[in-house]
Image (cartoon, helix red, strand yellow):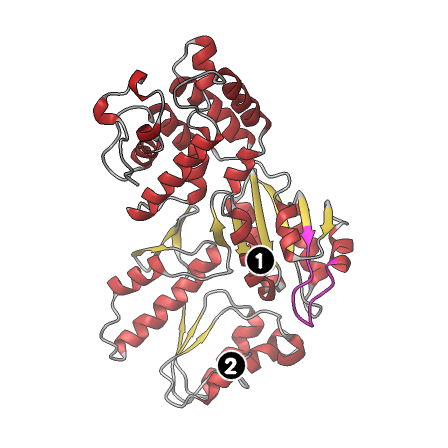
Amino acid sequence: MGGRYDATNILENKQVCIIAPIALDHTKFLGNTLEEIALTKLGIFAEGVPVVVANKQSQEVLQVLNQQAKQKHCDIIFCEKYHNRSANFLSQNFVYKGENYSLSLLGDYQCENATTAIETLQLLSKKGFDKINTANIKKALQNCIWHGRFEVYSKYPLVLLDGSHNLQGANALYSNIKDYLKGKQIVFVFGMLKDKDYQNIAGLLCPLADKVITITPPCERGLSGETLAEITSRYTDSEYAESITQAVDKAFENYNQDTAVIAFGSLYSLNDIRNALKKRLKFFYTNRILNNATFNSLLKEINSLEKDRIFCHHDMEHLMSVARIAQIINLKENAGFSADLIYSIALLHDIGRGRQYTENIRHETAGKQLAGKIAKEVGMPEDYISLITKVIANHNHDNKQGNNLLSIISRADKLSRNCFCCKARNQCNWKSEDLNLDIKI
């Protein structure tokens, strides 16, 4: 922590020192003003060792920095401002000193961080580190991962993790919400430590939220979630959760396609939040479909209409067989689709059967429209709905080739039929070569 008393300061053969933006944090240990904190941070300076300084520094910090660098005979490399930033949820692009860079991390402050890294690496390249070059720098920035910094934990449903625990981090999160989440219904899972500026952080961020679920971080310094809920309730609808698992469950109670869930406020909580999310989201849309009133009404209708049918039924047993076989194919062929997506499509692929019986509409055609309605009701985003309905509209065609999603569902649908023990096999309209007369998967 800090610099002067940081354990890394015992290193003797320093090549370069790096100063990121300095703000008020850890004041109990580092000092109560920016000047005091800067003096502690700049304790990493070594005689004659060059210093790379991030672009955004206050005048108080710059004054101390120049004084210390002069005393230690350090050359200073000040990072310049980047230009032409463009961003989406996958990456962002920017120009720095005439070079185009693509960055996997989100947020404009990460572009600032990247310029600091670029300057540092270019300096090391000049010092003789010959494997560092512009191409490798670009590749590294394009593929780097930084957990807990406006991290998109899940795109479907949309969940972000941010360890912002001071006012500087909260301001960065505020900017990112404004930048990336316009028009979204924001749900916070929020926990803080007692020694942080939780009053001002809550005042800054909570007015952006439609709902705040407060938690107590799992450490001795954790601020009571009940106390935090009293504060956040001044700004928006707030609720205290007794556990992180309960908080994650509450965050999704009213989830729809316009919702973004953001967990932030303490790095101490992130691991437990990840574990809770892993369990909660594994079959997120699948379980919402299973509990959807429209889905269950249509499935009940199909079961009633097929009560006396001698051929294969399109009941829950069939749907789950398709789901499980499709997931086996997905894993076996390393297709890379989520189990939740596979199971969701499998549950919905025959949902138009009732309309085929009652209105003589092909079940794929009716299924596309009905599946789209259900998918919207369970909160799927439009691009997810488009993908699912396209598969359902075409799943009954001959799609045996490739490991794309349509092929996987189509093959699983055919393989799910136990023709080898079917009593109506001799009356079936399937071609003999299409019948499953032995076990294939």
Q: Residue at x 24, y 62 (%)?
A: 135
| 35 and 255: which is toward the camera | 255
Callout count? 2
From the viewer's perspective, is 130 left or right of 314? Answer: left
Q: CA distance from mark 2 to mark 1?
A: 35 Å
From the viewer's perspective, is 356 left or right of 247? Answer: left
Residue 315 in picture, x, y percent from top left: 47, 27
Q: Main secondary structure of the magenta part?
A: loop
| 297 and 243: which is toward the camera | 297
Give, as a three-letter code, the residue at label 2: Leu
Work out whether residue 151 can be spotted.
yes
The answer to whether 272 is drawn above or below residue 391 in the figure is below
State which mark lies toward you, 2 or 1. Answer: 1
Which label sits on residue 42?
Answer: 2
Residue 437 in picture, x, y percent from top left: 26, 31
Along the polypeptide, which appears first: circle 2 or circle 1?
2
Q: What's drawn in magenta, residue-wise?
A: 213-225
Residue 217 in picture, x, y percent from top left: 66, 64
Q: Residue at x 36, y 33 (%)?
A: 416
Task: Count residues near mark 2 (Cα–Cα under 10 Å), then give few for <14, some for 14-19, many for 20+.
Answer: many
Q: Residue at x 29, y 24 (%)?
A: 397
Instruction: Report which quarter residue 313 is drawn in.
Output: top left
Q: Report the residue marked by disc 1.
A: 273
Give, as a three-letter code, the residue at label 1: Ile
| 73 and 307: which is toward the camera | 307
Where, quadrant-wise, is the N terminus in this rendering?
Answer: bottom right
Q: Secondary structure at mark 2?
A: helix
